[in-house]
Every structure is written in structure tokens, then in C-alpha cells.
Image (tube, rainbow, N blue to C red):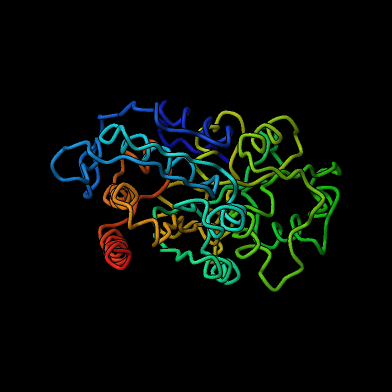
Amino acid sequence: MTRNSDSVLSRRKFLIASGAAGLAGLAGCTENNTDGEGGSGGDSEGTDSSGDGSNELSGTIDIAGSSTVFPLATAMGERFQTEHSEVNINLQSTGSGGGFANYFCTGQTDFNNASRPIKGEEETQCEDNDVTPVELKVATDALTVIVNNDNDFLGEGLTVEQLQTIFSAESTPTTWSDVNSEWPDEEIEIYGPTDASGTYDYFIEAIIGEEGPGHRQDYSATEQDRTIIQGVQGSEYAIGYMGFAYYSESTDAVQAVPIENDAGEFVEPSLDTALSGEYNPLSRPLFTYPARESLAEDHVAEFARYWMENSTSREIVADEVGYVPLGEDEQQEMLDTLNAAIEEAN
């Protein structure tokens, strides 16, 4: 195994650290990185959604949901506020499911970030409370399995079957040698997100199987990705998983495990392998869901447009945060969906 060498801008350190803080009011965060190449949706400083450079928008935008999408939402929110300082964005990292169930579908927030699509029961809860979610893809992530830097026994990586064995509620091995007799007879220490997390849900879907026995529960569960990194960093025989952006900020602390893909090749997570599709089955789309009803408010609608207009920006999405930006066709599809919802809301 080798550590990923993707370049990381220092701005990402703030974003990742903010993710561990939970609630973040972005009103005072106005730093803007103007270096690098912007995406087709706007220049490197972001798009002025108002079209005339005015700063007439005002109001509050409440956002909850995925810790994985949190750094991207933070980056977009900061840039938006450099142009619209009277808009206050309250951003909370609650996990995808926690955000839907406790905030968005009860009508308390305007957006819910998610690292997996909304579930049927969540749509029903939203409908019962007159909330209409609008699904917008914002990026692609490479869900990353990490181990301690002193781990030298995994060789070329892990197969999907080995990941199933380690994390499945059916097998629950206690030592590495229970998974492979050639591996150390040492206890496996497991770290990961809670069951409120979209990352947890996606891991079950991609690795364990939705019809399978489920995820083992005897592990250290947390909504704070930094805690997962710290746990794995502190134990030679630990393993965990999280979104790529959090790993990419900590490549000196832990190492990413190559995963065997459907072609039988062991592939490390990276922006390039996620974009190419080589890193499967752990590449996944990331979403934000504005409530259609909230889009009737100009400041909410303009922030949603701003995010979509900058969703192709390599500087923001890839270089600063650590995800794969949308392509131009995907971006246009999301803008069409959003603009139709805004029209319906009004």
C-alpha cells in the first residue's frame, strides 16, 4: 500500500476541522481563494448569482445532514457570503439520516446534505410535513478504508469479501487471523460512522449488501470523521472508513487501503480513480436536497443556484475540498432540475 499524494491546499484544513465542530455559523467566514482554475459554472471566486454584483439578498439559510458533504457546503457557503454578507448560513453536521429525520423532514432546515439518496421512508416523512425534497448531485466521493501506518500485512489490499467478513454482523471476527490465517493473531479494532450516517448506509449497500446480515455493532461509532482518523492512527491493528476528503487531509496520519474492483484489480482511492470508475464499488455520488418550499425565498434559491453553478469548479470541489466535480452535462441537468423547482415554488 502507498499513501495518496494528491495535492492538498491549506484551506482544506479549516474545512475539515470545522466538520468536527458540529454547528457552524458561516456569517463571519469570508476568506476566498482566488488562485487556480475555476469550473465552467463560474470563475475561481465563484459566480455572482444575482447577475449585477449587488448585495441585496438577506435572510438565514439552515442546513443539516451529511458530515461528508459538510466541507463542500462550507466552502460554497463562505464564497456565497463574500457576495451576500447579509445572508447568514447555519450549517450543522448531523449525518445524512439524522438530518433528514430530525431537521429537514420536520421542516426545520432549508437543505439536507446527504452522502446517499433519500430513502422512501424519509420521503414519506417529508411529505407528511409538507416538505418537498429536490435532489441535486453536487460531487462524487471515493469512500476510503484506512488502516494504521504500521500495518504491513495487508499486502496489495482488501477484497470486497474480506471487507464483508470484517464488518458484517454475521461473521464478526475478533482477530485479523480470523479473516486470513496468514495475518496477525491480533484483535481488530474497528472505527466507523454511526447508523445515522449516509456513509454507513452506503457501505452496507456497496459491501455488505442491503439484503445481508447488516453492519456489525461492536465497533467505535462516531459522527466525527477526525475521531475515526485519530482512533486508527493510535492503534496498529485498527481499521475504519470515511469520505475521501477527510482522509486526503490526513495522509501522513493513516494509510488508505486499495480495494479489489470488479475487474479484479486492487485500486487506491483518488479523485482520478473515482472519476474513471476504476475505484469501485466505493465511488459514490454526493447530494444536497433543498426543500422546494424554501426555494420560494430569494436568498435560498440564489444560494442553491450558486452551488450548482460552481459544482464544476476544480478549484473548489477538487483542490480545496477533495471530491470529483460534476461534468458540464451533469451540471446542466442539476440546474434544470433546480430551476424547475424554483419556478414551481413561486
Identify whether 87 is placed above or below 175. Answer: above
The extreme left residue here reads 52
Q: Is residue 52 left or right of residue 199?
A: left
For the image, the number of numbered tags is 0
Between 327 and 306, the residue placed more toward the observer is 306
The x, y position of residue 177, in whole percent, is: 83, 50
Q: Is residue 113 left or right of residue 256?
A: left
Q: Indicate the quadrant containing the N terminus: top left, top right, bottom left or bottom right.
A: top right
Q: Residue at x 72, y 43 (%)?
A: 191
Residue 276's image quarter? Answer: bottom left
Where in the figure is residue 34, as x and y percent of width and height? 25, 30
Closer to us: 257 or 50: 50
34 lies left or right of 261: left
Residue name at image x 43 percent, y 38 percent: 74
Residue 327, how many percent across, how many down?
A: 29, 57
x then y, percent, for residue 283: 50, 57
- Quadrant of the frame with the C terminus: bottom left
Residue 29 figure quarter: top left
Horizontally, residue 148 falls left or right of residue 304, namely right
For image coordinates 47% across by 46% down, the residue present is 63
Give the residue displayed 46% in from the left and 35% down from the top.
Answer: 5
5 shown above or below 266: above
